Amino acid sequence: MQIRSCPILVLFLLLFVTKSIAQPENYEIKNAFMIGGGMTYFDMITDNFETQKNTGFIVSAGIGAPLPHKWYDISYNFQILKNKFDIDGRVSDDVAGNEWIEYEMFGVQAGLVFHINLIGSYLTLDVGPQLAYNSDLEVRDSEMENYFLNNYETLQAKDILDVNNFNVNGMAGVSAGFGPLKLRAQYIYGLLNTFDKLNDLEAGDDFKGNPNYITFTAFLLF
C-alpha cells in the first residue's frame, strides 16, 4: 500500500510545485502624479526668415504608471508653454538694417510618453508623440509691429501673426532622478507647417516653418 501511494504522492507534489511556479504573481500598479516646470529654448526652422533662438517657460503635469518587470514605463503629460523666438528685420523698407524682432506664442500640448529604463527608473530614455495647440504669434514690443522683415521688400512684422494653431510633435529626451525628484530634458519637433497660412499672402514665396525646441524641467512625484 505504501509502495502504491508513493507515485501518487510524488505526482501530487510535482503538480503543486508546477502550479506554484507557473502561477503569475499579482502586482499592484500605483499611479504616480507629477508636477513641475522649467524653461524652453525655442526656434522656428524656416528658410524664409533669419531667426534666432530665445528662451521661454513651461509648466508640466502628468500621471505615470510604473510597470513591474517591464523594461519601460508609461506616462501621460500635459504642458503649458510660452515660447519665444526672434526674426531679423529693419526699421524702414528702403534702409538696410538688422533689428531682432521678438515674437512669442502660448501653447498647450498633451502627449503619451514611453520611458525606456536604462538604469531602472533612475535614468530613462523618453520618446512619444504629442498633440499641440498654439496661439497666433505676437510681437512682444508693439512698437516693432511695423518693422519690415529682411528677405522681403514690403512684408512687415505684423503681417505674419496668423499661423496654424495645431501641430503634431515628435519628442525624445531623458529623465533622471531619485525618489520624488526628477530632472528631464526633451527635444521636440513640430511635424506640421506652422507658416502654412502665410501662403495666402501675396508675397510671392512658399512659406514653411517648423517649431524646434528643447525643454529643461524639474518634477516632483507624488
Image: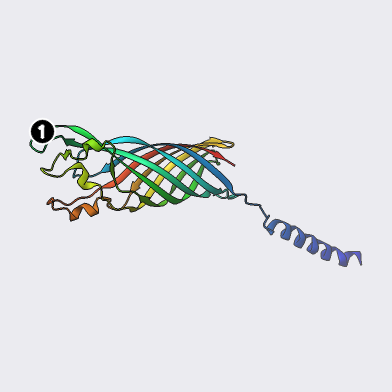
Asked if residue 108 lies left or right of residue 152, the reply is right
Local crowd size for mark 1, using a 10 Å CA cut-off: few (<14), some (14–19), many (≥20): few
Q: Residue at x 87, y 67 (%)?
A: 4
Q: Does 141 appear above or below 46? A: above
Question: Residue 5 vs residue 215: left or right?
Answer: right
**Residue 160 on image: x %, y %:** 22, 47
- Which of these two is toward me, 124 or 41? 41
**Residue in the picture at 25% in, 47% down:** 161
Please identify the quadrant where the C terminus is shown.
top right
Picture residue at 76% right of the left edge, 60% below the top: 14
Q: Amino acid at mark 1?
A: Ala
Residue 120: % across, % down? 55, 41
> Which of these two is toward me, 172 or 24?
172
Q: Residue 53 placed where, x, y %?
A: 29, 36
Residue 132 in view, yes or no: yes
Q: What residue is shown with label 1?
A: 96
Q: Return the residue found at the far right.
A: 1
Q: Name the quadrant of the N terminus.
A: bottom right
In this view, the residue in front, 62 or 97, is 97
From where the camera sits, is residue 71 visible? no
Q: How many marks?
A: 1
Left of 137 or right of it: where is 154?
A: left
- Quarter of the view holding residue 87: top left
Q: Which residue is situated farthest in the left direction here?
A: 94
Residue 52 lies, in percent from the top left, at 26, 36
